[in-house]
Image: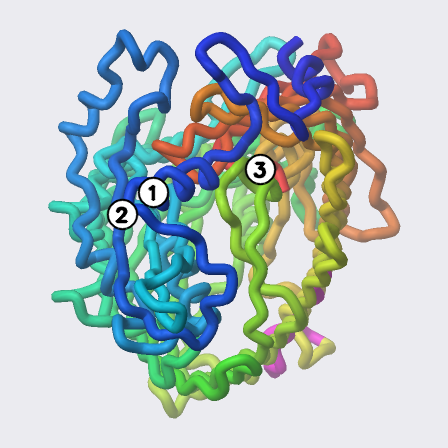
Amino acid sequence: MLGAYLLLVPVGRAVAGPGGLDVRAKYEENLVAAALARHGLVLEPNPEGKLIERVVIEAREVILPGDFPLSRYLPWTFLNRFHMRTREYIIAQELLFRVGQPYRTDLVEESGRNLRSLFILSVARLVAARGSQPDRVVVLVLTKDQWSLRLNSEFTLDAGAGRFRLDFLSFSLTEHNLLGRNKALAFNFALNPGRYTVGLSYTDPRIWSSRHQIGATANLYFSRDAGQLEGGVLQVLVGRPLFSLRTQWAWEASVQFQQSKVRDFHAGDLRILCFSGSGMLRIETAQRPCAEGDERVPNIFGRRLISGSLSLSRSFGIVNKLNLTAGFRLGSVEHYLTEDLPEELSDGARRALRGRLPRSESASGPFVSLTAFRAEFVRLKNINTFALTEDFRIGPSIELEIRYANPNFGFSSHFLELSGAYRHIFLFRDNILSMSVAGGMRIQDGVLPGTLLVNQDLAALVRNVSPRFGPFRLHLAARLRMRAHDLDNVFFTLGSDSGLRGFAPRALSGRNYYLVNAELRTLALNLWTLHVGGVVFYDAGDTPDRLQEGQWRQNVGVGIRLLIPQFNRGVLRLDLGFPLEPPATGPYAPTFSAEFGQAF
């Protein structure tokens, strides 16, 4: 009923209720107007080139008077006592301009993008105001914190015929703004159908207010059924990023160790492979169950990874950008059968499963990459979230990389790997069209009979976001992914966790995939600072091992989107999908899914 109501509300004009409630999504605009009035400032329509005489930083608390219902009677702002507001110097150090310099729109806009990229802020707006003389301006920097001590979470709920379960959960009890200094310390916990993860992480994007950064993560893995320790991961990254379009040099170094068990799940159950006594394994499905004499092989294996890299980047240009990176990369990955397999499993079934595993290898050597793009940005709203500014880079971009591995560098593999991508985003008035194609391959002898070209990969994506018509936008997307001569034995999955919302998570599995999505989304209904929207959608796709064998698995559905900007910039997605096909077994039932972020 709420979704149907949202489709009918004329969001383009004010609808006032008791107490002056305005359902228009003008969250940022109202904050800017109030800040200008508070400081006695008036907008400057033509600030370019004028002298910056003052920078006013207004860092607002998470919760302001009137943000939540019944503010006149309930002291919601008391909650700010449990949050340390971002210190002004943390905001100031992200600005790429200073008092006494001429106002340059490109630097002010880039400063705003840098601030909006900080997780600790829900709002970051920079506006120019009139100065004390006609040739001077004041820059108002308005920010509003997100709640920093928080239980950050990602989750996927799955509900269908006879099931309602938490398919995936990841959360971290994190202080993202430690002492108001934009440093994050977190206790991590994650749950998937096969294991628990617990650990700690620390991130400092500005070591001692420099441009150098560090991040470290240490997690342990425990099996979900027995609670036994089965591995973990240790990651450390240090470096200095290209923090501005004018930054010329950057570097990065990273190391990682990981040992884990990889489990392939379908709707909460370990995916079963059928072995008939000879030949290859095949996936058991409701349409094609294992035969009576087949061995049923659980799809589980072990993985051990050690990797490291060191790179140096040089950036050229300001508007027309060219970034060149050179570095050295090494890694050793081993895939193996684990003790989780049934003892009675035959040697033939074990050999077949071993042949299905990703290839183990050790490789080291240099790489060179190139990225070219035009630094043209636009600020839009109501694309992937509600009422908050979203930054998009429009125009073309190209990425190319060459990697060479040779035993002379210490590990055994010898290959040449090539990859590239082309992307283009077009903006026609209020219409956004994005297209991308990416591909890669490896030239390697002696690993696959009859060919030197292995790990061939092709991906394509087209997406269009229509202009507003009434309270609506139409979102369309189509994507394709194909692999051939695959040493890594990659299997793609589709389901309610990946854009096919009428089916259980990871319901479909195969070596290629294609997916089409269409959503009619409403603009936001603004209830105090809670933003609510509705969608109707259509999804279709499949994951065939060969494209000519693919089918058209379809669903339709309805959903709700929620945004509370004090706690997240992304929406909460609640969708109910109805498959357009009868079930292979059991009664027909829709699938309910919920998670943070849009479906596409």
Q: Residues within 10 Å of mark 2 (few under 14, many from 20)?
A: some
Q: Which mark is residue 58?
A: 2
Residue 464 or 200: which is nearer the viewer? 464
What's the amino acid at mark 1? Ala
Q: Secondary structure at mark 3?
A: loop
Expressed as whole percent of the image width and height from the top left, the position of residue 194 reads: 41, 32
Q: Secondary structure at mark 2?
A: strand
- Do tag 2 and tag 3 residues touch (Cβ < 8 Å)? no
Q: Which residue: 73% across, 18% down?
A: 8
Residue 92 among those drawn in magenta: no
Marks 2 and 1, how far apart at CA: 7 Å
Q: Which residue: 34% across, 60% down?
A: 139
Expressed as whole percent of the image width and height from the top left, the position of residue 453 reads: 68, 77
Q: Which residue is mark 3?
A: 598
What's the amino acid at mark 3? Gln
Residue 79 or 55: which is nearer the viewer? 55
- Do tag 2 and tag 1 residues touch (Cβ < 8 Å)? yes
**Label located before the other in sequence (1 or 3):** 1
Q: Which mark is residue 503?
A: none
Residue 240 or 233: which is nearer the viewer? 240
Marks 2 and 3, how far apart at CA: 31 Å
Total numbered circles: 3
Location of the C terminus (image quadrant): top right
Q: Residues within 10 Å of mark 3 (few under 14, many from 20)?
A: some
Q: Which residues are magenta?
A: 435-449
Mark toward the viewer: 2 or 3: 2
What's the amino acid at mark 2? Glu
Q: Secondary structure at mark 1?
A: helix
Q: Which residue: 67% across, 66% down?
A: 457
**Label located before the other in sequence (2 or 1):** 1
Q: Which residue is mark 1?
A: 35
Residue 539 or 504: which is nearer the viewer? 539
